[in-house]
Amino acid sequence: MAWSRKKIVENIEDLMRSKFTHPKDAFDYYDQNKDGELDKDDFKRLLKEAKVSPIIRGLVAEFMIQTFDANEDGTVNWDEFQTAIGETDLK
């Protein structure tokens, strides 16, 4: 299976739709230490549940942080996550 950005986003959307009623529920679920931010390990867990290949999971998690971390603090907060969700069909 070729893992394109589009395919990864589709897998994440499918996971969110099947498991959560609102994106905030997903954010809170994956925020393991409840600090209000998603770090690389949180994203790797999300990607594992979205059935993204373990071979690329770490790279994709790093890419997601770099892409969505607007304030460049190395994590993704709720506002940044909402912006990322804006790229999908999730509401």
Image: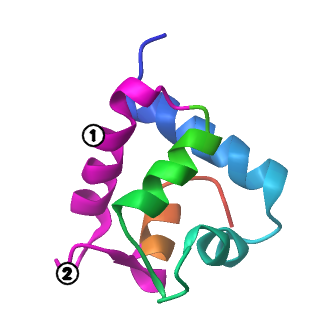
| Camera-side residue of 12 and 34 | 34
Q: Which residue is mark 1?
A: 59
* Residue 53 part of the magenta-drawn span: yes
Mark positioned earlier in the residue sequence (2 or 1): 1
In the displayed structure image, the side of residue 62 where residue 1 appears, left or right: right
* Extent of the magenta region: 52-80
Dominant secondary structure of the magenta stretch? helix
Q: Helix or strand or loop: what does disc 1 sit on? A: helix
Instruction: State the residue at coordinates (58%, 37%).
Output: 10
* Residue 40 part of the magenta-drawn span: no
Q: CA distance from mark 2 to mark 1?
A: 18 Å
Q: As shown in the figure, which amino acid type bears the numbered disc 1?
A: Leu
Q: Give the class, few, some or many, for how many residues have Cα within 10 Å of label 2's Cα (few <14, many ≥20).
A: few
Where's residue 70, x and y in %? 23, 76
Identify whether 31 is placed above or below 54. below
Q: Give the class, few, some or many, for how many residues have Cα within 10 Å of label 1's Cα (few <14, many ≥20).
A: few
Q: Which residue is mark 2?
A: 73
